[in-house]
Image (spheres, rainbow, N blue to C red):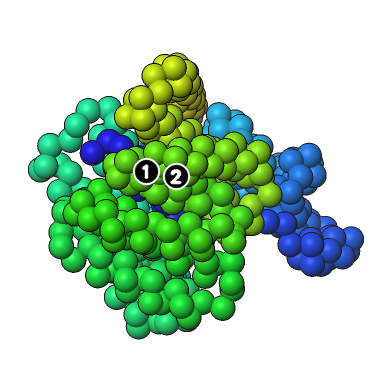
């Protein structure tokens, strides 16, 4: 089962990772961006620098890095957070094409922390797809599915149905890859394997239904191919039906190189299925031979080597040792050619640059194992022993590479978690400082309120004291006025009135008395006023 999955996943190199970042530099696009950059400034200049970095990174690490760092610096001075996040994403892409996975993953995770406030967006969707792809490479199976699901959600929310379907396509492939990864560690039981392959079929089926309704999306051969591979894991009899459907669609492809690759891949899958699952040597050999003839015309030395491997296996089982040895050695030589020329292979998927080397290492283990078996069955034990040593060396290289990849993933995750904890700590500190500031404001507001209340009370008390003092002064003044009437004025007035009466002048006495009474009334009436006109 492990060998089977190793070969199947090897055939899927060009299907596992999404083409969300360009694998080839388009000179026309770069030239146009340079023209626009001359007149640009501000945020527009940051966006153009980022576009240049994105398009140059597949061809030139130094050029891509230079423009990405310039975009990062300028976006920082402009406080352009989104531009800063995209620039960090592009720095990660530069490291990705350089096959520096540790720095690529570190920058991708940093970019995600910066861009998360802008979610959902296309940039985050693309970044999440790339994170899922790199986490597959470092064997971090726990995070892969979550990243692809989140990417699909971003594309769905912004209304990009095509990108959503591509994310679902990749998500389905990730379940298939997870089975292969876990099966390498320990043999999977049927229950978790069936659960994962059902998920793969579910998402692949969603995309297949969509593409059938939208035939302009050139993904149908890959979808039928995947459907066949997933059913093959379940040992379902409908497996070859989907391979034949994919083969039928391949005939309509216009690009000769792509058509030969896809037709060769389907014949290869059919040969594998008939030979390894149904033990039908004739059909297995026939399809594998057709695959080899088609793939020989392409630049996919890896797939061509895979077809030769199957032919060598079948000829070994048939006892045709001369031809079997020829196929196996030719396949091994092609693996060396592939490792040398992988950077020259034109492919829409940038993942081939790291996946191709990794899967080729896995395939070489199988190839050396087949050569050991071939020499043992043919009776050449000296060469069998020689290739057994090479097999052990290749297995050690593969194991060490796997371990290093896992360590890279763990280190990047650990550093990311430390950064996130620091950010959470800063947020908590800011919240605490803000809480303290609010407390201080409340405290000082309370003190200010208390002082204001005390001042108001003091003012009212002073006003009341002043009022009481004024009232007391008024009363004293009234008393003074009243006292001014007594006793001489009243005595003299009454004496005069008496005199008028004694002198028998009643009229004058009456007038005098009347005026005296009026005067007394006026004095009493005006005694309550502060001023008298």
Q: Position of residue 289 (x, y in %)?
A: 42, 58
From this viewpoint, is residue 304 visible? yes
In the rendered image, the vertical position of residue 508 relative to residue 439, given as above or below: below
The quarter of the picture where the C terminus appears is bottom right
Question: Depth check: 395 or 165 in front?
Answer: 395
The quarter of the picture where the N terminus appears is top left
Q: Is residue 415 left or right of residue 247?
A: right
> Which residue, given by chain and number where applicable, does mark 1 sit on?
320
Question: Depth check: 97 or 505 in front?
Answer: 97
Q: Position of residue 63 (x, y in %)?
A: 80, 44
The label on residue 323 is 2
Q: Is residue 293 left or right of residue 221?
A: right
At label 1, counting other C-alpha atoms closer than 10 Å, the crowd grade (few under 14, some 14-19, many 20 or more) is some
Q: Is residue 272 left or right of residue 390?
A: left
Identify the secondary structure beneath mark 1. loop
In the rendered image, the vertical position of residue 424 relative to residue 131, given as above or below: above
Q: Is residue 344 left or right of residue 120?
A: right
Q: Position of residue 133 (x, y in %)?
A: 45, 45
* Number of numbered discs: 2
User: Mark 2 touching mark 1, by CB under 8 A?
Assistant: yes
Q: Position of residue 15 (x, y in %)?
A: 44, 55
At label 2, counting other C-alpha atoms closer than 10 Å, the crowd grade (few under 14, some 14-19, many 20 or more) is few
The label on residue 111 is none
Question: Depth check: 263 or 322 in front?
Answer: 322
Q: For the point 27% across and 27% down, which residue is it?
A: 185
Distance of label 2 from label 1 (alpha carbons): 6 Å
Identify the secondary structure beneath mark 2. helix
């Amino acid at each position: 089962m492990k060998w089977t999955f190793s070969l199947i996943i090897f055939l899927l190199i060009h299907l596992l990772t999404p083409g969300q970042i360009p694998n080839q530099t388009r000179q026309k696009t770069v030239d146009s961006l340079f023209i626009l950059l001359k007149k640009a400034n501000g945020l527009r200049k940051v966006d153009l620098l980022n576009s240049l970095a994105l398009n140059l990174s597949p061809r030139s690490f130094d050029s891509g890095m230079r423009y990405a760092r310039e975009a990062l610096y300028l976006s920082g001075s402009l406080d352009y957070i989104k531009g800063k996040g995209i620039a960090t994403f592009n720095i990660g892409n530069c490291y990705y094409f350089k096959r520096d996975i540790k720095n690529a993953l570190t920058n991708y995770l940093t970019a995600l922390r910066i861009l998360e406030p802008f979610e959902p967006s296309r940039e985050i969707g693309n970044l999440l797809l790339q994170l899922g792809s790199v986490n597959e490479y470092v064997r971090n199976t726990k995070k892969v599915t979550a990243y692809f699901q989140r990417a699909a959600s971003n594309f769905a929310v912004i209304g990009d149905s095509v990108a959503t379907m591509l994310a679902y396509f990749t998500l389905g492939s990730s379940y298939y890859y997870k089975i292969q990864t876990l099966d390498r560690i320990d043999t999977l039981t049927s229950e978790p394997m069936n659960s994962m392959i059902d998920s793969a079929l579910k998402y692949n089926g969603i995309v297949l239904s969509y593409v059938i309704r939208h035939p302009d999306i050139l993904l149908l051969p890959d979808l039928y191919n995947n459907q066949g591979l997933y059913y093959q894991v379940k040992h379902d009899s409908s497996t070859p039906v989907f391979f034949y459907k994919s083969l039928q669609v391949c005939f309509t492809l216009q690009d000769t190189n792509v058509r030969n690759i896809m037709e060769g891949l389907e014949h290869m899958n059919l040969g594998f299925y008939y030979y390894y699952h149904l033990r039908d040597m004739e059909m297995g050999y026939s399809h594998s031979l057709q695959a080899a003839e088609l793939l020989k015309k392409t630049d996919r030395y890896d797939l061509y080597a895979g077809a030769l491997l199957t032919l060598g296996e079948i000829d070994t089982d048939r006892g045709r040792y001369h031809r079997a040895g020829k196929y196996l050695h030719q396949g091994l030589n092609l693996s060396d050619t592939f490792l040398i020329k992988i950077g020259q292979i034109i492919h829409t998927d940038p993942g081939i640059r790291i996946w191709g080397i990794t899967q080729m290492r896995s395939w070489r283990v199988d190839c050396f194992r087949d050569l050991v078996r071939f020499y043992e069955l043919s009776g050449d034990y000296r060469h069998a022993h020689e290739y057994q040593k090479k097999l052990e060396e290749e297995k050690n290289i593969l194991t060490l590479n796997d371990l290093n990849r896992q360590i890279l993933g763990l280190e990047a995750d650990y550093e990311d978690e430390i950064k996130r904890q620091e950010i959470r700590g800063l947020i908590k500190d800011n919240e605490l400082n803000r809480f303290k500031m609010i407390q201080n404001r409340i405290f000082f507001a309370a003190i200010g309120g208390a002082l204001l209340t005390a001042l108001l009370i003091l003012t009212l008390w002073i006003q009341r004291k002043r009022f009481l003092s004024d009232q007391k002064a008024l009363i004293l003044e009234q008393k003074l006025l009243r006292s001014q009437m007594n006793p001489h004025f009243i005595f003299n007035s009454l004496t005069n009135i008496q005199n008028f009466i004694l002198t028998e002048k009643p009229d004058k006495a009456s007038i005098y008395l009347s005026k005296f009474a009026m005067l007394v009334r006026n004095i009493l009436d005006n005694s309550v006023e502060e001023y008298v006109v």
